[in-house]
Amino acid sequence: MTQLAFFAEARREFHSSLLDGILTVDANGVPSNADKGSVLSRKIASAVLERLGVSRTALKLPGQTAGSNFEETCVNFVRACFEKTGHLRPGDFFIQKGGLIASFDQYSHLDDLEALASKYPEMATALGADYLIKPDLVIGRRPETDEAINVAGKLVDEDVARLTTIRLANQDQPILHASISCTWTLRSDRAQNARSEGLNLVRNRKGRLPHISVVTAEPMPSRIASLALGTGDLDCVYHFALPELVDALTEIGGDDRIEQLKTMIAGKRLRDIADLPLDLVI
């Protein structure tokens, strides 16, 4: 028997965790990630679910609870897979659920803005609060010691490279490597929230731009497109079961929907959850 690739096994465990948790059906057979008011959403979500495994019948969890559980499941998947890529992207990385971006080097100046806004209310009105971003999932990289930098030969000393942030001798804050939003389903307002967060990460950074991505279990191609199409705000959108979604739409039919999905995939705007860990290596 051929052994499954690690990412394939991790993907299967990811789906198993969802099936044991938030991915359920109600008494009428409607999947928990479907829009109950949309016949097409229910149909697509059901077809995807059939391809993932046996679901439980349970009451749909409140939105905040479902969102938190989805975040936790995504964190576990990304951590398990990204930790296997150390040979491709060496470094002292850590992965966590949530966290203020101001705790990372590129955005540490935002603490000063918040302090000023608290002291001077008129500044708070001008600045707004859009810069106070709390990502669902973050990957950080700790600065390296000079011993680590010089392991293959003396690259730095006390007189050179005194401003780079990767060097612990210069600063001790972690560097934000990736900011990932985990959105169980997409409605127009949620899609725009994720896009706004991405845009603010781009605008407010001082230094290297982190990876900015979204993971979703949304079944409707049109809603995925509202977030995935376009460039600049996000690196890419990752679907929790993209091959299953493609198969489901092919079965259900609808040339426009299938074409829309293929456009996002061919345009490098939509990928599967299993692609995310290796994209984070780049």
Image (cartoon, rainbow, N blue to C red):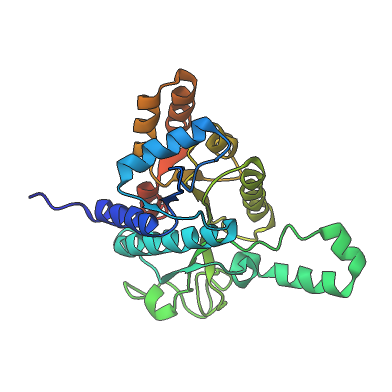
Vertical order, 134 against 249 (above or below): below
Quarter occupied by residue 131: bottom right
Q: Residue furthest left?
A: 1
Q: Which residue is located at x 35 percent, y 56 percent?
A: 14
Q: Percent from the top left, x then y, of residue 8?
A: 26, 51
Horizontally, residue 272 falls left or right of residue 126, namely left
Q: Position of residue 259 (x, y in %)?
A: 46, 23
Quadrant of residue 179 in the image? bottom right
Residue name at image x 51 percent, y 62 percent: 137
Give the left or right position of residue 106, taking residue 236 as reference.
right
Task: Please say whether residue 150 is visible from this viewpoint.
Answer: yes
Residue placed most toward the observer, 64 or 14 = 64
Residue 272, image x, y percentages: 39, 43
Q: How many marks?
A: 0
Q: Quadrant of residue 277?
A: bottom left
| Vertical comparison of 266 with 57: above or below | above
